[in-house]
């Protein structure tokens, strides 16, 4: 029987400390699974324009291990571009997404593979059961993001979901059919559908190095997800407009009645300025919401490539 190929995609950005540790864990996993199952492995390291020795280490690993492939971008294009590039170059019957910092436990992959032997399943994904070790403010905003996006979007995103997952080929092919430039992978994984089972595990600290995600970067990433998978903010802008129009009509009637019936003078400068600033602020907020959607549409119409490969030995996958 022909062995099944498992491709593991690992986006890397300034991971010179963590990458050797990850490869050691990958090699142990590979040996264990090949002793138990008829499988082969393909490790795809995607260097996202790192400024340290990540590329040098990735190229070295590819030179000494035939199962390791690597790609290096011409500059930093972001993790979403790294995920896309890895999926486009993965040839496996099964394709896994994994981080290089070992916050995604490689040892879970064997259990994920076993679960996918069920013909009714297409994907096994992971989620963090706890956020132990994460700053409290970041954890609170993360929980609020998942609650918000699940309320305003038809696409369900599981709280604590990681990019770490193992997918069958048919699901990966469907993901690659989505040609959008502004990508939010957690939403895309859910939007394409397919039967998915979830594995929970406790939060794990990085094995080495520093996180590349700042609080502001995560906020912008969350905003991208909301804009990509919900038009509810546009409805919010419309509701604000209707609400303030209604309030304005009521205020006009009140002023007319007070002036004609009771002879009260119209309120003066301070109250007028407060109303002007309030209405102007709401208008700018609504224009900002519309601007986000226009900006995304503008970027989509340009059809710029998501990344450029400067060097590497991985070949693109071509669907038969």
Image (cartoon, rainbow, N blue to C red):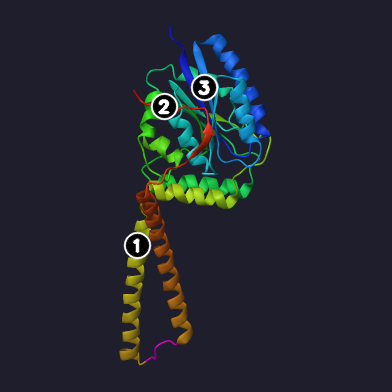
- In the displayed structure, does residue 13 sit left or right of residue 317? right
Give how far across and how far down residue 201 sits, in percent: 57, 30
Is 267 covered by the magenta stretch? Answer: yes
Q: Residue furthest top?
A: 1
Q: How far, Cα to Cα, is label 2 from label 3? A: 13 Å
Position of the C terminus, as image quadrant, is top left
Q: Is residue 262 above or below residue 174?
A: below
Q: Main secondary structure of the magenta part?
A: loop
User: Which stretch appears magenta?
Assistant: 264-268
Q: Nearer the viewer, mark 1 or mark 2?
A: 2
* SS for dot 2: loop
Give how far across and how far down residue 92 sits, in percent: 45, 22
Question: Closer to the N terminus: mark 3 or mark 1?
Answer: 3
Is 197 covered by the magenta stretch? Answer: no
- Crowding around mark 1 (Cα neighbors within 10 Å: few <14, some 14 to 19, many 20+) is few
- For label 2, the residue is 317
Question: Closer to the N terminus: mark 1 or mark 2?
Answer: 1
**81 or 65: nearer the viewer:** 65
- In the displayed structure, does residue 230 sit left or right of residue 160? left
Displayed quadrant of residue 68? top right
Q: Is residue 313 above or below residue 213?
A: above
- For label 3, the residue is 42
* Total tally of numbered discs in the picture: 3
Q: Which mark is residue 219?
A: none
Picture residue at 48% right of the left edge, 84% below the top: 270
């Amino acid at each position: 029987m022909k062995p099944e190929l498992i491709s593991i995609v690992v986006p890397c950005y300034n991971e010179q400390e963590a990458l050797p540790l990850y490869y050691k864990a990958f090699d142990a996993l590979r040996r264990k699974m090949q002793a138990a199952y008829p499988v082969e492995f393909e490790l795809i390291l995607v260097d996202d324009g790192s400024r340290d020795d990540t590329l040098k280490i990735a190229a070295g690993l590819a030179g000494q291990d035939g199962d390791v492939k690597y790609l290096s971008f011409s500059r930093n294009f972001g993790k979403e571009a790294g995920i896309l590039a890895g999926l486009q170059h993965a040839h496996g019957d099964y394709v896994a997404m994994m981080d290089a910092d070992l916050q995604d436990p490689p040892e879970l992959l064997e259990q994920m593979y076993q679960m996918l032997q069920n013909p009714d399943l297409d994907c096994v994904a992971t989620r963090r059961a706890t956020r132990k070790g994460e700053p409290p403010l970041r954890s609170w905003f993360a929980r609020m993001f998942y609650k918000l996006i699940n309320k305003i979007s038809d696409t369900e995103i599981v709280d604590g979901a990681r990019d770490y997952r193992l997918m069958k080929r048919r699901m990966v092919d469907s993901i690659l059919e989505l040609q959008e430039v502004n990508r939010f992978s957690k939403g895309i994984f859910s939007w394409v559908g397919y039967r998915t089972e979830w594995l929970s595990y406790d939060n794990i600290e990085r094995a080495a190095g520093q996180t590349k995600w700042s609080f502001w970067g995560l906020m912008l990433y969350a905003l991208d997800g909301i804009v990509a998978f919900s038009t509810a903010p546009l409805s919010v802008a419309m509701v604000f407009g209707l609400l303030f129009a209604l309030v304005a009509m009521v205020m006009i009637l009140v002023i007319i009645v007070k002036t004609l019936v009771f002879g009260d003078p119209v309120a003066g400068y301070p109250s007028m300025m407060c109303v002007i600033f309030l209405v102007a602020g709401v208008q700018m907020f609504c224009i900002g919401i519309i601007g986000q959607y226009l900006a995304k549409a503008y970027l989509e119409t340009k059809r710029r490539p998501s990344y450029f490969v400067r060097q590497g030995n991985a070949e693109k996958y071509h669907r038969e």
